[in-house]
Image: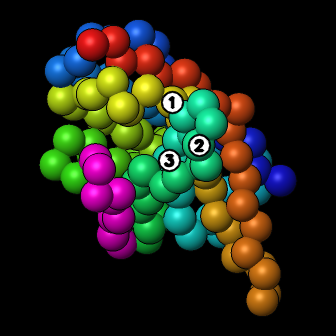
Amino acid sequence: QVQLVESGGGLVQAGGSLRLSCAASGSIFDINAMGWYRQAPGKQRELVASIIISGGSTNYADSVKGRFTISRDNAKNTVNLQMNSLKPEDTAVYYCNARRPYRTLTFDYWGQGTQVTVSS
């Protein structure tokens, strides 16, 4: 099992910044990717950004490119999401995700979510 604990959400004005952190614990030795997803009221959960643990390759949703940066600290088993130039449409619950392959399967683990609210 993998446990994920997010922190750093909150209320910010449009144009402001927030930094989310996700600490992973448990059976983390073969996690190969981590990422951040978000879900706004009435909408489906969507990928915001992801990072490959070995190598550091990243992927971003078009809506956040140039504003958000995902990074990892392998020594601390954490993944961070720096969010700049926030917009009201970034308001959502943000979830940390960890992906662990096992033979032909892939297991997804989720944090409890942290609320990000951007006021106009």
Q: Residue furthest bottom?
A: 104
Q: Position of residue 7 (x, y in %)?
A: 53, 23
Mark 1 or mark 2, which is nearer to you?
2
Circle 1 sits on which residue?
92
Q: Earlier in the sequence, mark 1 or mark 2?
A: 2
Identify the image quadrant of residue 13.
Answer: top left
Read off the magenta span: 55-64
Quarter of the rendering occupied by the C terminus: top left
Q: Give me the residue at 72% from left, 61% from top.
A: 108
Identify the image quadrant of residue 114.
Answer: top right
Amino acid carrying label 1: it is Ala
From the viewer's perspective, tell me whether residue 39 is left or right of residue 4: left
The disc placed on residue 36 is 3
Q: Is residue 48 above or below residue 32?
A: above
Assign a secondary structure to mark 3: strand
Assign a secondary structure to mark 1: strand
Q: Are marks 2 and 3 in contact (CB under 8 Å)?
A: no
Q: Give me the residue at 44% from left, 27% from top.
A: 91
Circle 2 sits on which residue?
43
Amino acid carrying label 3: it is Trp
Measured in 3D between alpha carbons, the distance from the residue under mark 1 to the one under mark 3, in whole angstroms, is 12 Å
Measured in 3D between alpha carbons, the distance from the residue under mark 1 to the one under mark 2, in whole angstroms, is 10 Å
